[in-house]
Image (cartoon, rainbow, N blue to C red):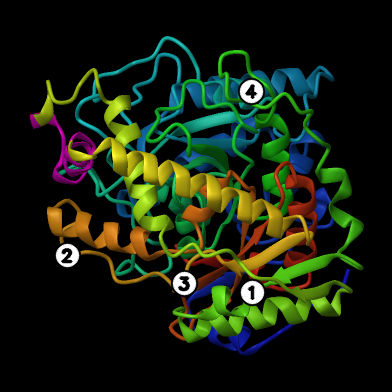
Amino acid sequence: MSEPVLTRRELLASLAGVAVFPAATSASQVTGPLHYASLADVASLIAAQEIRSSDLTQQMLDRIAAVDGHLQSYVTVMAEQAMASARRADTEIGAGRYRGPLHGVPIAAKDLCCTRGVRTMAGTKVFADFVPDFDATVVARLEAAGAVILGKLVLCEGAFGPYFPGLQVPVNPWDATRWSGVSSSGSGVATAAGLCFASIGTDTGGSIRYPSAVNGCVGLKPTYGRVSRHGVFALAPSMDHVGPMTRTVEDAAILFEAMAGADPQDPTSLPDPVPAIRSGLGQGVAGLRIGFDRRYATDNVDADVAAAMDEVLATLTRLGANVVAVTMPDVSQVGNAWFDLCYAEALAVHASTYPSRAGDYGPGMRAVLESGQRLSPVKFAEATRLRADVTAAIDSMLDTVDCLVCPSLSNSARAKEADPYDEDTAETWGALVRNDIHCQPFNFSGSPTLSVPCGFSADGLPLSVQFVGRKLSEALLCRIGHAYEQATPWHLKHPVV
C-alpha cells in the first residue's frame, strides 16, 4: 500500500476535533472505539467469533441511546427486532452457517424503505401511521445476507425538503451549527457518528452525495436500475437511485454486492449480473484514464474544494493513473429541468393523498406538488428532451475515460437554517439544487457515482470528491475510489461524539 499523502488539510484536521484510528489489517488489530471500525473489520471479528453479534448490537443500541438524543438521526430504533436478528446470527455462525461479510453486522435503513411490521413514514405526516406488511427488496436482500437492522433513519419530507414541521432534524456530528445534508441526512449522520456500520440511502438529485459529503462518508449512487426500488417510497421514480452510505469504499462494495441485482417486482431493475467488486479493489489505478474538466470542477466552488480536486489528481497520478482533459457537456439548465421533472413525477406519486390531504403536507413538499399542478405539458416535454440530450452527451464523454473527477458538493457544510421547516428554507434548498451542476446531471443520465472524503476545509469540515463512471462501472469506480482512499488518511478520521 502506498504511503499516505499528507497535506495542509492533515494539519487543519488536527485542529478540528477529529478522532483518528488506524484501519485494522486483521480481526485482532481493530483499535480505537469499535463503533468507528470499518464494516469489513467488524465482519472479520464476527466471522472469527472474536465478538458476538448480540454483544456488538447491544453496544450499538447503547450508543444510540447515549448520543442520538443530540444527533437525532434515528426516527425509529428497532431494538427488539435487532437483538433477535443478532442472536440468530450468533446461533448460525456458531453452527458453521456463516452467510458472508454482512452476517451479524448492525446497519440502518433510511425511513422510506419499507420494513415489515415497522412504521415507515418517509418523513411525512401523511404516512405517519403506515406499517407495511412486507420488506423493501433492498432490506430483504440485506437481511438475507445476515445484516442486523438497528432502525429507521430520519429524512426530509417525502425525500425532498425541507423537513415536515416538528420532525426531528439530524445534527451534523462535525459541527452542530452546520447543515447535515438533504433527504438522507439521517443516514449520513448515523454512519459518520458511529451509530451504525453502514446505512441505506437514496438519491434523486444528490441525497446520497450531499449528506455523504458534509458528514464525511462514502456514498455510492449506483447506475439507475442497479438496485431495486421496490418497497422504497418514491420521489421522482425515473431519477430515484438506492445505494449504500458507509465509512470506507470496501464497505460500500460489500453492501452493493448484497443490494444489487434484477428484481421482478421492479420493472426498471437491470438484468445484468452483479460483479464481485470487493475482490478487485486492490488492482490499483495504474494506466487508467481519469477525466477532468477544470472549468466544470473548479469554477464557482470554494477555494478549499478546488484545491482538494488538485490534490486528488496529484494522488491518482502518483499512483500511476493518467489524468486527461475532457469537456463536460453544458449542464447549466439541468437544475431547472430537474425541478420540472421532479414536480411532475412527485405529483403522480402523491396522487392518492394530494390534494385530498393537502393540509397534512408541510410547506416545502406542498410547494413541490403545487408546482407539479401548474407545470405545463410543454415545459415537461422540454425538460424531457433536455434530459435525453444531456444523457447522450454525458455518456459520450464518459466513453473516453475510465472515470470523471469532480466535487460531490461545491462547498463544505454551510450554516444550517434558523427554521428547518418553513417556506424560506424550501426556497434556500431549491436554489442550492437548482444551481448545483455536480449532482443532478448524473441523476438525469443514470450514471454511477462514488463520493469519497478528500480532506477538510479551513474550518475543519469534511470535503468530498465524486468519481463518475460509465453505466454499470461500479466495480471500476470502487477500485479507483479505494486506491485513492488507501493512499490518503481521510477515511481514518471521525468526529468526536
Q: CA distance from mark 4 to mark 2?
A: 39 Å
The dot on residue 410 is 3
Which part of the image, by quadrant, shows the C terminus?
Answer: bottom left
The kind of residue on which mark 1 rests is: Asp
- Quick check: is 448 in the magenta stretch? no
Q: Examine the rendered structure and indicate whether residue 474 appears above or below residue 450.
A: above
Identify the secondary structure beneath mark 4.
helix
Nearer to us of marks 1 and 4 is 1
Number of numbered discs overlaid on the protein picture: 4
Q: Examine the rendered structure and indicate whether residue 59 appears above or below residue 486.
A: above
Residue 68 in sight in this render: no
The one nearer the camera, 87 or 152, is 152
Q: CA distance from mark 3 to mark 4?
A: 34 Å
Left-right relation of 396 to 172: right
Q: CA distance from mark 1 to mark 3?
A: 14 Å
Mark closer to the chain start, 3 or 4: 4
Identify the secondary structure beneath mark 3.
loop
Q: CA distance from mark 2 to mark 3?
A: 22 Å
The kind of residue on which mark 4 rests is: Arg
* Mark 1 touches mark 4? (CB < 8 Å): no
Q: Residue 204: horizontal and vertical position, in percent?
A: 45, 44
* Mark 1 touches mark 3? (CB < 8 Å): no
The magenta-colored residue range is 359-373
The dot on residue 141 is 4
Residue that lies at the very extreme toward the top in this rendered image = 133
Nearer to us of marks 2 and 1 is 1
The kind of residue on which mark 2 rests is: Ala
The kind of residue on which mark 3 rests is: Ser
